[in-house]
Each structure stands twice: as C-alpha cells, then as structure tokens.
Image (cartoon, grey):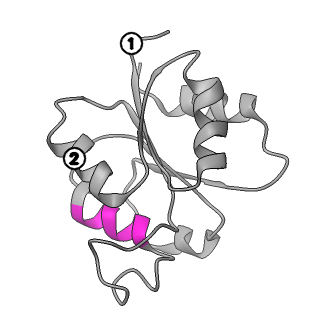
Amino acid sequence: MGNKNILIIEDEADMIHRLITELKKHYKVEIAGSVSAAKYLLNESGISFDLIFLDSIMPNYPYSVEETNGGLETGWVLYEKELRDKRIPIVVWTRHTAIFTKPWGGNVHYKEKKDGTNDNQLVDLAKKNIKL
C-alpha cells in the first residue's frame, strides 16, 4: 500500500465497494458516505488528502434542497463551500454529467459513472490525478 491518501465522497455502497476494492491495494483510502462525514475528514481528521473522488448526487443535508437542486448537485455545493480553495486534485465521478458544465477549478477532472467502467480504469484515473 502506498503512502498517498484518497478520500472517496460517495453515498452508494456498491460504488464505494467498487472504488475501494482496487484503490486500497495502492493507496490509503478514507470513505465519507455523507457531506457531514466529508467535512469532518477534510477539516478535523488531520488527514492530508492527495486525491478526492467526489459524487454529485447525494443527500443534501446539511445544505438545503434548493441549493443542491434536490440533491443532484450536493457534490457541487460541497465543492464550492469546502473544496474550491484547497489544492487537492478532484475527480467528479457521477451519473449526473450535466454537473460537468459548472465552473469547477483547474484541479477538477470528470468521469461519468457508467456500467462497463472497470476497476483498472479507476486506478489509472487515480494514478493520473495524484501529484507524485
């Protein structure tokens, strides 16, 4: 296992399993299944992350339904409030590809969640985006 830390912000158990199964062979992986957990890991855990996988569609709490577009843009709101000023590479990995048109920063990359994406592609995506 490497010494690079990846944070997965994702609320779907099958997607979490899929991401961590292969990634944990190469990296230290932390999982945030909610915005509250992500905020804790980012701001209070003392862990420095080298890459974040960010889902867009998640329960909106603690944000409003209106600002998250009914939960479709919860990842975007989290990015705006917690991540924009951090220099961490982020992979927005979601089925809601309309979110890719938002004004994300230059450290953000995109990958559509879809059937047929294999685990090796996810590891390659991590390797490509982690600053060595």
Tag 2, which secondary structure?
Answer: helix
Which percent across, then down, holds residue 33? 43, 51
Q: Tell me if 84 is positioned left or right of 31 in this view.
A: left
Look at mark 1 in the image and give the residue it sits on.
3
Q: Nearer the viewer, residue 86 or 4?
A: 4
Res 85 seen here: yes
- The residue under the point 52% across, 68% down is 57
**Cα distance, mark 2 to mark 1?**
21 Å
Compared to residue 30, the image places residue 93 above or below, namely below
- The residue under the point 38% across, 74% down is 60
User: How many numbered badges does the structure rendering display?
Assistant: 2
Residues in magenta? 74-81
Name the quadrant of the C terminus.
Answer: top left
Quadrant of the image occupied by residue 44: top left
The label number, if any, that marks residue 13 in the structure image: none
Question: In the rendered structure, does residue 36 fall within the stretch colored magenta?
Answer: no
Query: Residue type at mark 2?
Result: Tyr
Q: Tell me if 18 is positioned left or right of 73 in this view.
A: right
- The residue under the point 63% across, 69% down is 97
Name the main secondary structure of what is drawn in magenta. helix
Compared to residue 54, the image places residue 23 above or below, namely above
Q: Tell me if 1 is positioned left or right of 65 in this view.
A: right
Residues packed near mark 2 inside 10 Å, few (<14), some (14 to 19) or many (20 plus): few
The label number, if any, that marks residue 40 in the structure image: 2
Tag 1, which secondary structure?
Answer: loop
Q: Nearer the viewer, residue 11 or 78?
A: 11
Mark 2 or 1: in front is: 2
Which percent across, then down, holds residue 32? 39, 46
